Amino acid sequence: MLRMIGARLLTTVPSVIGVIIVTFLLTRVLPGDTAAYFAGPAATPQAIAEIRNKLGLDRPLPQQFVSYVTALVKGDLGQSLTTGQSVISDISARLPASAELTLVGLLLAMAVALPLGVLAAVKQGSWVDHLCRIVATAGVSLPVFFTGLLLVYVFYFILGWSPAPLGRLDVFASEPPRITGLLLIDTLVARDFETFRSAFAQLILPALTLAIFSLAPITRMTRASMLAVLGADFVRTARASGLSNTKVIGTYAFRNAMLPVVTTLGMVFSFLLGANVLVEKVFAWPGIGSYAVEALIASDYAPIQGFVLIMAIMYVALNLLIDVLYGVIDPRVRLEG
Amino acid sequence: MITRRSVVAAGLSAPLVIQGTARAQAPSRSETLLLVQEYGPNSLDMQGIGASQPVNGVALNCYDRLLRFKPVPIPGGGGNTIAMGELEGELAESWQLASDGMSCTFKLRDATFHSGRKVTAKDVKWSLDRAVSIGGFATTQMNAGSLEKPEQFVVVDDKTFRVDFIRKDKMTLPNLAVTIPFIFDSELAIKNGGDDPWAKEYLKNNIAGSGAYKVESWKPGVETIYVRNDAWTCGKLPQLRRIIARDIASPSTRRALMERGDADVSYGLPPKDFKDLLDAGKVNVVGVPIPNGVWGCYLNTQVGPFKDVRLRQAVAWVMPYEKILQASLFGRGVDMSGGTTPKVAWPQPFPYKTDTAKAKALVDAAGGPFSTTLYFDAGNATVAEPMAVLMKEALATIGITVEINKVPGANFRTEIAKKTNPMVLNRFAGWLDYPDYYLFWTMHGNNSIFNIAAYQNPALDKLVDAARFAPDKASYDANVIDFIKLVNNEVPMVPINQPTHDVAMQKSIGGYQFQPCREPDFRYLTKG
């Protein structure tokens, strides 16, 4: 197992190097002038030139690249101009916020999508199947900012059930000591149940928005792969052997149908992590997606490079995790590595 | 009966009903203000390079200046604004202009920094030296008031400070009241500055001032929390003990927070939301026409079709002023058409109004139909996009085909610096409310980046310079009237309207104070 993980990790090294080079070049090719943007409202050409010099943007590209890589090796991702902080501290402050939101959203989606997908496959053509189709279509066709705003409008503005969409915590709640950065866990560790409830209440609507969006791929994938498995020989054999329906579906069919579903889950997770910018905007969620977009608007290179790099690493780690999971789900995969 | 289902349901709904109790145990809500804004400060040092717009608010509330603008009532009510010439002491207890008018001596108040040290003239000198030497926007702004060299700032004794003038400039004293020349605790800054004589890194992340508020916590991109400095002596002690400024990017969310009464103050909503809030009447909306601010259409006078003054006038004649005011600003602004006699003021209506026949005649005389491109900053799209579309429609009726080009924020500066774009929509507002100051930036031959029309006219330069350093009011007025007449005729920029700076506040909030930097001044606000 360890050898497999090691071998897998080695193959990712070239892709990470590729990501570093490509993001560096891409950010430099972007139109827009960082120095002019940050020189402020009444900048003279001299002032802009001064800033360009200070940021090192007047040096030739290879030289900029070497200093970027040298800093990177020391673990320094550079300084963000939009927040005025180092990119590392920004990302480590914001990544947990995105991760928590995405995880909870994904768990919610799984809780609905997996049973729904299985049921739809088992009772093909029944009302459950149609419901599954409707839910999936509605989920993907509603843009997230629309679902988000709609939920805010109904549950906060009209009904007043949900707390004000002010970010991760109510303004008067104080943040627990930071351990994981995931508020739900940190508050529990600190035994601060008041803040836990506040954090949980803030999380429900944005997580629901994400869940609605990610329902579709998970349900459809579960249904399709269940259908394929249910038609397989071993299921017929199991049924013929007189095993109960629950046993056939729950133990044999579902487990075998999980492989493509896990892959989809991994894809959806990594996609949501960086791409839920609109949900972050609507709910004032201090996540990593909106951070990257704001940096992009300002042509602020360091955070964009840092964001892409971190996402690439996360993606690699996630894929590795999925591969390991494959082995757990299906012993046949384990040997091949 | 307790079933698993009911327990799960109770668990899920608990967080939804709990918020009432969570709030009750917090510090008194009546002394805390919740401000929601689009984005927060990226630094705590307004003099530093790259400081964003909200950093002005930090400078305003956490630091003191020698002078400040005196509050004067907003004509329509709702709070106070400022008047350029009217100043009062902030750190200065009194000030005296020399008899030759070439220097000004300030007596300092007995004030203490947050660190507990007394404010001395040495701190004032260090801070002003820093502003003129640090480069970037701070230095540019200082220069605008003829504050250019450290030698101008003289420590007379611990409590007395003198500014020597390079030339007589009516903007020198007002420029000491803007959010750049604020006073640092120089000992604290130098001690923590390391090798950097201006302690840029330290001051970016720390407050070293004497102002009415301290920063309790600052999470860039999330929130800034201010607490009152109870030892503040440079004005009436503010009523609000604590300010929470949360960054809420989505304007729809900010509006919902205001309407539900969860947030106390919101800045920067789209004009339509302000109008709706005003019409609904549940919250107060205070609007101040932005002093020295105007939306204008800049027509390139050096390259392209608008070199011909007749075509520039044609654009001014065909501009749908009233429609733009209603459809893009929802009435939250002042129309700039149909002026009669030139006044000593800026902005002011130009003598054009929508008259398609006149515009058509001018286009025909100048050689008939052509195509061109109109640029604007995508960051301003909420207002600028409808404006551009209406202009495109109107210009089509006189044979000018317009293609609209929306430029992303980071590119816009680069784009206008080229000075080759035929038509650009832009809003410019100077901090110092003088007509000559505005024209110095936007039409003077020094060709600053905001002279988007690339207008070059020695006659105008002469009048603007003469007004800038005019020895008395009569000659100032005469020069201003003359250059207004000149640009009325030459129209390198067609003024469209003067936008209103709007703020939405709950009815319980009072004491609104407008500042030229357009950031909230917590020191005057009241609640209850």
Image: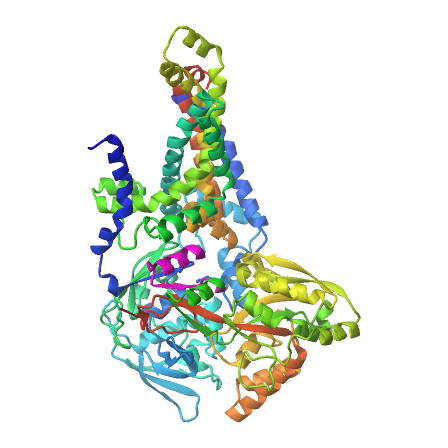
Residue B301 visible at all: yes
Residue B447 visible at all: no
Instruction: Please state which of residues A153 and B153 is positioned toward the viewer in this rendering.
Output: A153
The quarter of the rendered structure image containing the N terminus of chain B is top left
Q: Quadrant of residue B502?
A: bottom left
Which contiguous range is marked in magenta? B251-271
The quarter of the rendered structure image containing the C terminus of chain B is bottom left
Rendering coords of residue B507 (x, y %): 33, 68
Was residue A225 drawn as part of the magenta stretch in this picture?
no
| Residue A1 vertical position relative to residue B418 in the rendered view, above or below | above
Identify the image's colour scheme: rainbow, by chain, secondary structure or one colour: rainbow
Rendering coords of residue A60 (x, y %): 57, 51
Q: Which residue is pictured at 37% across the width and 10% down the height?
A: A243
Question: Is residue B1 rendered to the left or right of residue B313?
Answer: left
| Residue A159 vertical position relative to residue B183 in the rendered view, above or below | above
Q: Which residue is pictured at 73% across the width and 75% down the height?
A: B357
Was residue B254 drawn as part of the magenta stretch in this picture?
yes
Q: Which residue is pictured at 48% across the width and 10% down the height?
A: A233
Instruction: Please state which of residues A328 and B263 is positioned toward the viewer in this rendering.
Output: B263
Instruction: Please state which of residues B83 and B255 is positioned toward the viewer in this rendering.
Output: B255
Instruction: Please state which of residues B450 and A249 is positioned toward the viewer in this rendering.
Output: A249
| Residue A17 vertical position relative to residue B63 in the rendered view, above or below | above
Rendering coords of residue A317 (x, y %): 42, 32
Callout count: 0
Rendering coords of residue A316 (x, y %): 46, 32
Question: Is residue B398 rendered to the left or right of residue A336?
Answer: right
Q: Quadrant of residue B206?
A: bottom left
Question: Is residue B188 rendered to the left or right of residue B304?
Answer: left
